Image: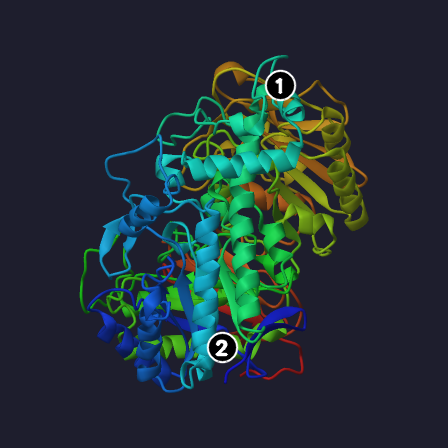
Amino acid sequence: MHSAAIRSVNGLPTLFVDGRPEVPMLFFGNTEVAGHEDIVASEIRLAAAAGVHLHSVCTHLDVRPPADPAAGGRRDLSRAFQALDTAIGADPDACILLRVNLCLYGRRALAWEREHPGEAMRFAVAPAASGSGMVDEDGRWVEQDTMVSLASDDWLACAEATLRDLAEAVEAHPVYSRHLLGYHIAGAETGEWFHFQLRERGLDLSPANARGFRRFLAYRYGTPEALRRAWALPDGDGPATFDAVALPADLPGNDRSLPAERTLLTRPDDRRFIDYADYASDLVADRILRLARCGRAATRGRRLIVFFYGYHFDLYDARTGHFRLNRILASPDIDALSSPICYTDRNEGGVGALMGPVDSVHRHGKLWFVENDLRTFHVLRSGPYGDWVPSIPDLPTLREVYRREAGTLLAHGTGSWHMDLFAKGWHALPEIWQEIASLKKAVEDWRQQNGPLSPETVLLVDEAGLSLSAHAEALGMNLLYRFRLEFYRAGLRFGLFTLEDFLDGRVPSARLAFLAGGFALSRDTAVRLAQRLREQACGLVWMHGPGRTADEDVAALLGFGLRRVEGPMQSLAMAAAGPSTLAEALSARGAAFQPPAMGDAGRGGGVSAASPAWTLAEPDPGSTVLAAYAEGPLAGYPAFACARVEDTRRWFFGGMAMSAGLVREVARSSGIPVLLETPDTCIAGNRTVTIHSDGSPGIREVARIRPGPVLELHTGRRFEAGDPLRLEMPPHSTRTLVFLSEEEPTL
């Protein structure tokens, strides 16, 4: 019987199977696509031949009570057993992470609704075709019209019972119990635990969700009187009881397809909208924690418990339910989290960005798996499944993209699974598995020596503040999604963390922190942040504005005050206040600053707009204004400024996404080493640097992160201690440098 666990080795979460460390690289085959089981089996055989025996397969289970108690009340688990049989039949040494979706969709959701009225989701925004679909319980592609609400307590009880029944059946089975690593528990939209259809159709207006929201408010406020005060309702107005509270169907930004009228919820009567965003994340977190506790108990702690969660940068909206990562990380019942690679900028020439604050996950001893669902050039059998992401054209190009992904595993210490999302045969080619086997060996040789990432520069996400988002596409798309991409092209060693982990001292290496979402810092949080910055001699870049954070706390942290500018949506385009002033402030080299390098909405994005926006409260002799807004009513007002506070630089940037070039210059001015000056992807760990080139050929010169010899990983080339690290790179190629100690051999 296999046992599996995640344990810390040299500060890095490490997968152990039967007491032995294993490289956390798996193959995922979609065993739910009807008629494609032979393709999945062939891919598993090829993976096994290449030395990969860790696999993941998937199933939906019907969580309704057994239909025929007279037959013994036994639940139908045959679909899970078929998935296990596919993997074991193809690889007798298979160790399997079984993905189990416990939610009810489509016709099964409607059947549940007939027995539990008011528990199927319903929406005010209802486009004719949402464009969102999935492989259903019968292996068919269907549009996801509805789902049983996560707020249903009856559904949750049945889901827990189903998970227990499955675990008991597997543990008692003489074959399955010997092959199981654990359970990847899936649910909600696409199994990834974000609120079903939220992005396309807005909030769930079902009676079940209304009951859940009222229960949340009763717990938060205690009395209707306290609720009315918090919601700034006039005396005598508002609900007399919590049962009279309605869901906020007038939520700003509920229909994302409409232009934004404002970007942050800063008005006194916005509290009810903020409460709903908090509830949305609390609800998802509660369901995950309940199922994790159930799974841990049912497996008696011998199996991994894994969830999708924490997609801050790609879901970028607290209403999705993914903004309680700190609660999830505190659970002893969860071993690992996962997400796919960022869906844009993922193929050749792209950055392959991580979706969440992965380095925070690892600081809590949990492992992050990257779902590597890159579409390859190899297709055995097509199907009516989404091809919204283009494929990688050939094997040489795929090799370079895979090497970039291995750079992430080395730098951040993540795991991964190579995935055939629609069982088309993306990995049914021996040459592809030869490449994966080579990368697995490289990761095995160097991952542990690299250790937990100790970055000088960090991007911090404040989960609480992002509940103030009034329009996800206008705010989060720029502030989180696009801005995150810029860090990959800034040539820095950077980490992705939650603000809470930074405050708790879990990132002692940080010397420059970019704060995204600091819209609702409490006095206590502001004091803790000031103390942490002082203790670490760490600079701060406050992105966009303070939201509801108190003026005096902002001034104490930045060294100057900010003023909120109300009104209609305003362009955040900006231009340098003066080339020499900016050059002196940002560049020790004295190079002239070029305004286009400032950016605002990230690589390939247009200029963003906001309401409200922020500028300096008044001229301050202690601050230097570096740029001004360039358009509309804000034109001429300070947009970018810095000051010295306790021997560190504190920055205000009124836009939502600095360009990579400006991130680089801000870091350089703060004494942070810049590793690469070109706008290529740079993924740096403690002793590895991976460069993936953009579309231009030429020489890339990499700065050293430590003295001593350097190994070019995939070619075996060795640079001695004094050699310049000059790399000849064709377009869309990858190089990984390993910085050795003098006594280390070249492998």
Query: Which is nearer the N-term, disc 1 or disc 2?
Result: 1
258 shown above or below 505: above
Q: Give whichever of 48, 396 is nearer the camera.
A: 48
In the image: residue 420, left or right of residue 715: left
How far from the left and from the top, in percent, is residue 281? 53, 43
The residue where tag 2 is placed is 442
Give the amino acid type for the residue marked by disc 1 in the picture. Answer: Ala
Q: Give whichever of 491, 723 is nearer the camera.
A: 491
How far from the left and from the top, in percent, is residue 167? 47, 72
Residue 739 appears in view = no
Q: Give whichever of 132, 116 is nearer the camera.
A: 116
The residue where tag 1 is placed is 232
Q: Give whichever of 181, 647 is nearer the camera.
A: 181
Check residue 59 in the rendering and tell me which mark sits there, or answer none: none
Please tell me whether mark 1 sits on a helix, a strand or a loop: loop
Q: Give me the C-alpha separation between circle 1 and circle 2.
A: 59 Å
Q: Nearer the viewer, mark 1 or mark 2?
A: 1
In the image: residue 720, left or right of residue 1: right
Q: Looking at the image, which residue is at 28% across and 40% down?
A: 130
Q: Looking at the image, which residue is at 64% across and 35% down?
A: 220
